[in-house]
Amino acid sequence: MTRLVKRWWRLAVVVGGVVAALPGGRAAVVAEEMQYPLSVAAGADASLLVADRTLPGLWRVAGGQATVLFQGKKNFRTPLNAVRAVAVAADGTVYAADSATRDVYRIADGQPVPLTGGKIGIPVDIAIDPSGDLFVSDLESQRIWRVPAAGGEPKEVATLAAPRGLFVDGSGRLWAIAASGSAPLVRIGADGTVEGVVRERVFEFPHDVVVDDDGTAYVSDNYAKAVWKVAADGTASKWIQGDPLKGPVGLAIRGGKVLIADPQAKQVFEVGPDGRAVPLTAAAP
């Protein structure tokens, strides 16, 4: 495909925040169109939701193809201009965190609805507790907030050094990455007590965490180009490293498999127990 035709092909994909028809009647875009995927979440159906910082906006991935769920504007301080995270509630409601507007959004009828009125500094991840409320990590204030699902005043949960990835496990416990802390992986109790899980700085630059049903945690490490496995006793070991991973950031877990959003690879991968990373979107023509 020539450079001129490729440029036309890209422009034909998204018009006004919707997916346009492509040559041959296709209505989906391929991996080349995903520019900087930072976060991935498993949808209520078999789909995935992906936050793409450069789109900027959200993709829905199903059947190996990605379509635009919402595309923000390039203007700063407009919704999802600097989207950083996406999460999906048990009822299928999609939430997204955006540092350009300092807020968290619920996506309703394809449009973002602000929940806090711009009262969060740099929201970098979202986790949903069993009641449906949101936990939000705020890199600016060094805090984790609780935000009502219906919106309202954020309430402080805990103070944490460089909080990033969040995850609520099957027992309702909140796990968090403290990227600059002496304990880079922690659990946070209902009373705000912070318990170190990994108590030494073994990670190079940790971003996100997920936990499987048996209590094993997985941590993405952007600088190491790796995903670590953390045993129940806090022992961390590299699970997968190197190609095809180039800079893993966002994690999710689905059906016992770990999902990885890698902005450097412009791809979302799925990794099973064998440690083999499989891309989940089609290769560009």
Image (tube, grey):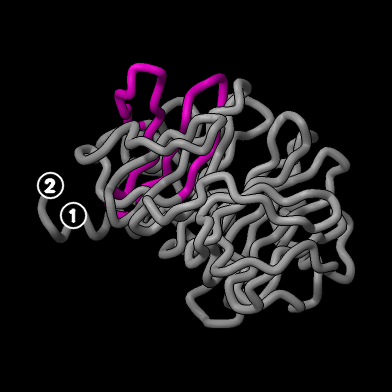
Q: Is mark 1 on a helix, strand or loop?
A: helix
Examine the rendered structure and indicate whether residue 264 appears above or below residue 61: below
Q: Residue at x 80, y 35 (%)?
A: 91
Q: Mark 1 points at which residue?
A: 5
Residue at (76, 78) in percent of width and height: 119
Q: Using the numbered discs, state the Cα–Cα distance from disc 1 to disc 2 in whole angstroms.
A: 6 Å
Secondary structure, mark 2, is: loop
Determine crowd level at label 1: few under 14, some 14-19, many 20+ residues with C-alpha closer than 10 A. Answer: few
Q: Report whether 55 appears left or right of 222.
A: right
| Residue 232 visible to an observer of this rendering | yes
Looking at the image, the residue that sits furthest to the bottom is: 76
Residue 157 percent across, percent down from the top left: 79, 62
* Quarter of the view holding residue 161: bottom right
Percent across and percent down for residue 266 are 32, 49
Residue 1, numbered label: 2
Residue 41 drawn at (x, y percent): 58, 41
Q: Which amino acid does label 1 sit on?
A: Val
Question: Label 2 crowding class (10 Å Cα cut-off): few <14, some 14-19, many 20+?
Answer: few
In the rendered image, residue 154, in percent from the top left (x then y), is placed at: 83, 69
* Quarter of the image where the C terminus is located: top left
The stretch of residues the image draws in magenta is 250-279
- Whether residue 106 sits left or right of residue 86 in the image: it is right
Pick the front one: 233 or 70 = 233
Residue at figure coordinates x 54%, y 71% from the top left: 81
Q: Do the residues labelled 1 and 2 touch (CB within 8 Å)?
A: yes
Residue at the image position 67 percent from the left and 50 percent from the top: 195
Q: Against 41, is 200 above or below?
A: below
Q: Which of 117 and 124 is in front in this view?
A: 124
Residue 38 seen in render = no
The amino acid type of the residue labelled 2 equals Met
Left or right? Give the position of 74 relative to 263. Answer: right
Was residue 271 drawn as part of the magenta stretch in this picture? yes
